Image: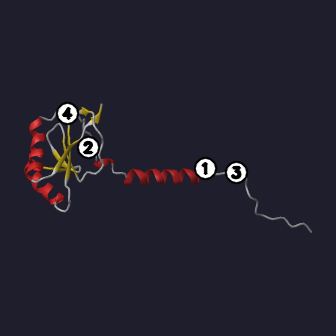
């Protein structure tokens, strides 16, 4: 009497489960990335070194809108928001990111706020 097993292992590889996993990973990384929190600014060119010890980033775009860490804020509330965000930092630093086309008086407004409150200001530029 011959007994045959009904379970045969197929030597083929199915790619459908692999593509499902890759698709789910792609969706996960697209949803968790913080690309929507960045501002696209054309910074002026200059020679200098980069710094990564920023406490607060203040950005001014070509439409003269102010942003603190990618959150819009009006010019009249800029100083109060900066004071609130930098009150617990021992060496408060502001990274000023102003586009090339922004008039200088808007950048000077941020520098004046920093000067009155003893904050350090670093101007962000793109490399030459």
Q: Which color scheme is applied? A: secondary structure
Callout 4: SS: loop
Question: Residue 118: x, y in percent?
Answer: 12, 53
Q: Earlier in the sequence, mark 4 or mark 3?
A: 3
Distance of mark 1 from mark 2, alpha carbons?
39 Å
Crowding around mark 1 (Cα neighbors within 10 Å: few <14, some 14 to 19, many 20+) is few
Query: Where does label 2 land, which residue?
Result: 39
Query: Where does label 3 land, which residue?
Result: 12
Query: Where does label 4 land, which residue?
Result: 100
Q: Residue at x 12, y 49 (%)?
A: 114
Q: Residue at x 11, y 36 (%)?
A: 104
Question: Residue 51: x, y in percent?
Answer: 29, 46
Residue depth check, mark 1 versus mark 4: number of the one nearer the observer: 4
Distance of mark 4 from mark 3, alpha carbons?
59 Å
Distance of mark 1 from mark 3, alpha carbons?
10 Å
Looking at this view, is 113 or 106 the one in front? 113
Question: Residue 16: x, y in percent?
Answer: 58, 51
Residue positioned most to the right: 1
Q: Is residue 13 above or below residue 125?
A: below
Callout 1: SS: loop
107 with respect to 95 (left or right): left
Query: Where does label 1 land, which residue?
Result: 15
């Amino acid at each position: 009497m011959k007994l045959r097993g009904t379970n045969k292992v197929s030597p083929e590889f199915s790619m459908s489960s692999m593509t499902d996993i890759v698709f789910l990973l792609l969706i996960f990384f697209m949803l968790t990335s913080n690309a929507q929190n960045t501002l696209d600014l054309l910074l002026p060119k200059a020679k200098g070194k980069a710094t990564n010890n920023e406490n607060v980033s203040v950005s001014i775009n070509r439409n003269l809108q102010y942003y603190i860490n990618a959150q819009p804020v009006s010019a009249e509330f800029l100083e109060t928001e900066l004071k609130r965000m930098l009150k617990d930092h021992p060496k408060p630093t502001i990274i000023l990111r102003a586009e090339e086309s922004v008039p200088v008086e808007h950048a000077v407004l941020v520098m004046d706020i920093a000067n009155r409150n003893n904050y350090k200001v670093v101007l962000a530029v793109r490399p030459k």
